[in-house]
């Protein structure tokens, strides 16, 4: 899992067949745009690789999951449909 897109691209060039882009710290639109471009670029060079994209964070408050960090299913579907990520992840914070 990495936030550095150059590093992820380099790993694929070395022969790795899966990478995990962590855009969870980015705002939704920036993450959506960044992940979409990255996945398009990767798939054009490595069509058989898998790319997992990180969506948003699950925030903990006093060791309890904060209800306002639950995934919006409509937004999650939009994210997957636009980015074309093979896998979808969430980050626990």
Image (cartoon, grey):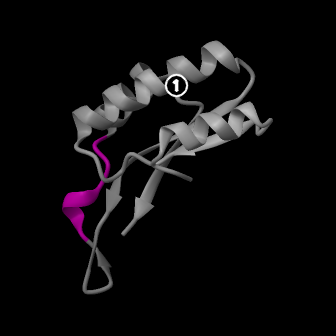
| Relative side of 91 to 50, left or right | left
Figure quadrant of residue 57: bottom left
Disc 1 on helix, strand or loop? helix
Residue appearing at x 33%, y 39% in the figure: 73
- Residue 4: x percent and y percent? 47, 45
Q: Is residue 80 magenta?
A: no
| Relative side of 86 to 28, left or right | right
Figure quadrant of residue 47: top right
In this rendered view, identify the residue nearer to me: 81 or 49: 49
Q: Residue furthest left?
A: 68
- Residue 42: x percent and y percent? 59, 23
Q: Residue furthest bottom?
A: 62
Q: Is residue 69 magenta?
A: yes
Bounds of the magenta segment: 66-72
- Residue 30: x percent and y percent? 26, 34
Disc 1 crowd rating (10 Å Cα; few below 14, some 14-19, many 20+) is many
Which residue lies under the disc numbered 1? 39
């Amino acid at each position: 899992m990495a936030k550095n897109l150059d590093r992820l691209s380099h790993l694929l060039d070395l022969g790795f067949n899966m990478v995990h882009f962590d855009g969870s710290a980015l705002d939704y639109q920036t993450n959506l745009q960044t992940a979409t471009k990255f996945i398009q670029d990767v798939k054009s060079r490595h069509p058989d690789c898998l790319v997992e994209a990180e969506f948003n964070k699950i925030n903990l408050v006093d060791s309890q999951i904060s209800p306002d960090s639950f995934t919006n299913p409509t937004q999650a579907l939009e994210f997957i449909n636009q980015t074309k990520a093979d896998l979808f992840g969430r980050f626990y914070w």
